[in-house]
Image (cartoon, grey):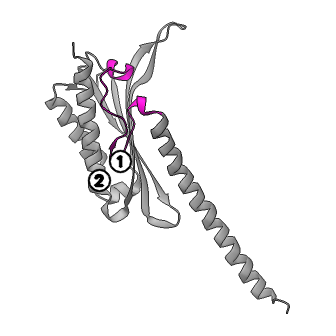
Amino acid sequence: MRRSRSGARGHNLARTTGIRRFVAQTLFERHVVRYAAIVLVTVTLGLATWAGPVFPARTVRSNQVRSLADLSMIRIAVRPLPEVLRRAGLSVDAIRSQWSEALQQAGFDVSDEALALLELRLVTMQDPNDPDNFAINPVLMLYQNARVRRRPGELVIPTYVNIRIGIERRDGIANPVRRVLQAMRGQFIQDCRRANEK
């Protein structure tokens, strides 16, 4: 029996839609897997999963922890938040205020005049097959002036990096993000103290 033209068009449309969904899901999964692979191969940079560090406590200070020695003045920058986080009640001003207060309580001078820049960026990616499912990627970097022996002058480069990754539902996204940001603040302060240990 020959298939009608309208039936063939419907079949082709359904097939195309299925292919698009498969491609979108594959891209989303590859994105998450790529970040998971980054966590596994770059733990020396201080990366951690959403649930906690993927590396044991280190007894030898890494170069990035050593770069925090004698750090006393910091400038804080929180980059614009993704829409899903803004709608969940998070804001750049509130996050910056929390970081400023925590760092000041830890003895840091938080000032826009500081040379060292602590930058926080939160990246999200929506699951194409489940619009209420999001991969979340907070990235914390400390930029400082540093010298490279093979060239004159100073460069502004990230000397400290902390990246975490998680997957959350839209309706419960705010509190897990707040908790992980609190953990990242605590780790940064702890690493600064470790950098000054004799």
Where does the image place residue 111, in percent across and percent down from the top left?
24, 26
Query: Circle 2 is placed at which residue position?
Result: 176
- Neighbourhood count class around disc 2 (C-alpha, 10 Å): few under 14, some 14–19, many 20 upward: some
Q: Which mark is residue 63?
A: none
Where does the image place residue 88, in percent across and percent down from the top left?
31, 59
Q: Residue at x 44, y 22 (%)?
A: 157
Q: In front: 146, or 196?
A: 196
Q: What stretch is highlighted in magenta?
A: 42-67
Image quadrant of residue 135?
Answer: bottom left
Q: Which residue is drawn at 23% across and 30% down?
A: 189
Q: In front: 116, or 25?
A: 25
User: Which kind of residue does numbered mark 2 sit on?
Assistant: Pro
Q: In this view, does 37 lie to the left or right of 178?
A: right
Q: For the residue labelled by badge 1, is the local secondary structure a helix, a strand or a loop?
A: loop
Q: Residue at x 53, y 63 (%)?
A: 128
Q: Which residue is drawn at 40% across and 17% down?
A: 145
- Neighbourhood count class around disc 1 (C-alpha, 10 Å): few under 14, some 14–19, many 20 upward: some
The quarter of the image holding the N terminus is: bottom right
Where does the image place residue 59, in percent across and percent down from the top left?
29, 23
User: Which kind of residue does numbered mark 1 sit on?
Assistant: Trp
